[in-house]
Image (cartoon, rainbow, N blue to C red):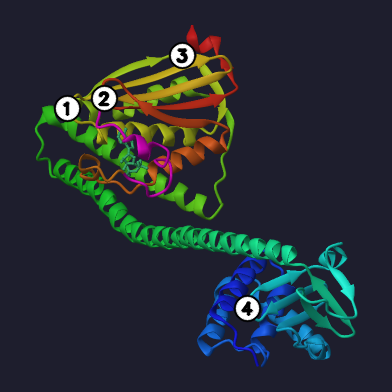
Amino acid sequence: PVDTPNDLYKKVGALFNMLELKHEVQTVCCILTLLDHPNVSLTESQKQFFRELLDEQVPNLEKVKKRLAELRQTAEVIDHKLKRKSGAYRVAIADKTLSVREDGLALLYSPEIQTSPSVLLANSSPPGMHAEIIPELFIFIPDAEIDKAKQTIHQQYRTGNMILALMVVLGGVLGGGIFIAVHRQRELDAMKTNFIATVSHELRTPLSLIRLHAETLHHGRVSEDKVHDYHQTILTESERLSGIVNNVLDFSRIERNKLQLHIESTDISALCKQIAESFRFRLEKDGFELEKQIQPGIVVPADPLAVSQILFNLMDNAIKYSDGEKSIRLELERSGDQAILRVADRGIGIPDKLKKHIFDEFVRSNDSKASARRGSGIGLSVARRLAEEMGASIEVVDNKPTGTIFTVSLAGGSTNEAAIS
Ligand code: ADP
């Protein structure tokens, strides 16, 4: 038996890479047959290398194995065709032929090469020609043809390596993708756990304020001039409480695909005024200035509770994420056939790279100023979903010189002249 030089191993490897990548199952099988053949003396580690390559890289390995089992039978039949003469081996399976020369040159033939005019078919071997045998037939290959084949093989080898490198990179990217996905899932799990703790805490604050103020009032321990403030605090905090509870309920309905809105003709000018009024006490108490520019009588087809919830979330955030200049502008105007609702603050702003994710659930800025404020990270995701359900859109841009502007655009509707006059 011929000792296969190391080259053979490399070149067959190159062919293998090339062709396997093209999903040429048959060629993979050729190689496998070669590997198993007693006349081709690959070392154990070389065989191991091929097996590992197969395991790692043939995505359709099962298909290949099945095909291999089929071909094994054929291979047994054609095994007798594998003859050694002039130092050449030839393995012919289906329409592909792999011939391996003693010097390690592996040539892959397709039927076309056999019809090439420079390849002669004859019954005897002229000197100086590389001859190979298949039963009853010699194939003579001129040296030029072999050189060409050598070049092709080198090229294939290089391409094979390039594709291999590319696959490694792609594998890395894919692996990275999976890693990111797993990482994101873990993050989401952690966020969900955190969410329950945060919401409970968020609920506790208004609840304890309501209780404290109600109890103090109940025991008559409030001076006459403060009674109104106590009532106001109870009212404001219970609105905040409902805001949080409604967010959680909406969020849970969204998660379960159970969100159902009731679209009706809604006077959102009146709604905006109402929400602004409900925030008045809290704004005053915290030293905020609220500038209102609400065009009267704008009526749109919308779910009034959903619009209130969106507005509540935006106003609540505007207060929560303000720092230094405590100034909020609430605008409502008609523009073409749309009603445009804006909540602008002069607060800490949202970093650019976070803007496109800010409407995703549980996304919170990890900026130290933002994370110092309590929040569960669902307010904006609920707002976006409610808006989308009404055919509206919501977006965020920077305010000048600082802060953010959230804009909700609601389509359709009209202006109610009666409401204006
Ligand atoms: P929460 O406020 O409960 O964290 P939201 O979904 O309402 O959740 O907001 C998500 C994140 O978006 C906030 O954590 C904050 O980082 C950022 N954000 C929202 N509104 C504003 C705003 N007006 N100014 C600055 N950052 C904001």
The residue labelled by disc 4 is 103
Q: Residues within 10 Å of mark 4 (few under 14, many from 20)?
A: some
Q: Residue 209's x, y, as percent?
A: 20, 44
Amino acid beneath label 1: Gly
Amino acid beneath label 2: Thr
Decide: marks 1, 4 in contact (CB < 8 A)?
no
Q: Quadrant of the N terminus?
A: bottom right
Q: Residues within 10 Å of mark 2 (few under 14, many from 20)?
A: some
Q: Residue 301's x, y, as percent?
A: 58, 27
Q: Residues within 10 Å of mark 3 (few under 14, many from 20)?
A: many
The residue labelled by disc 2 is 402
Q: Label 1's element?
A: loop
Relative height, residue 94 to residue 405 (above, below): below
The residue labelled by disc 3 is 296
Foreground pick, 43 / 178: 43
Amino acid beneath label 4: Asp
The residue labelled by disc 1 is 324
Marks 4 and 2 sit apart, C-alpha to C-alpha, by 75 Å
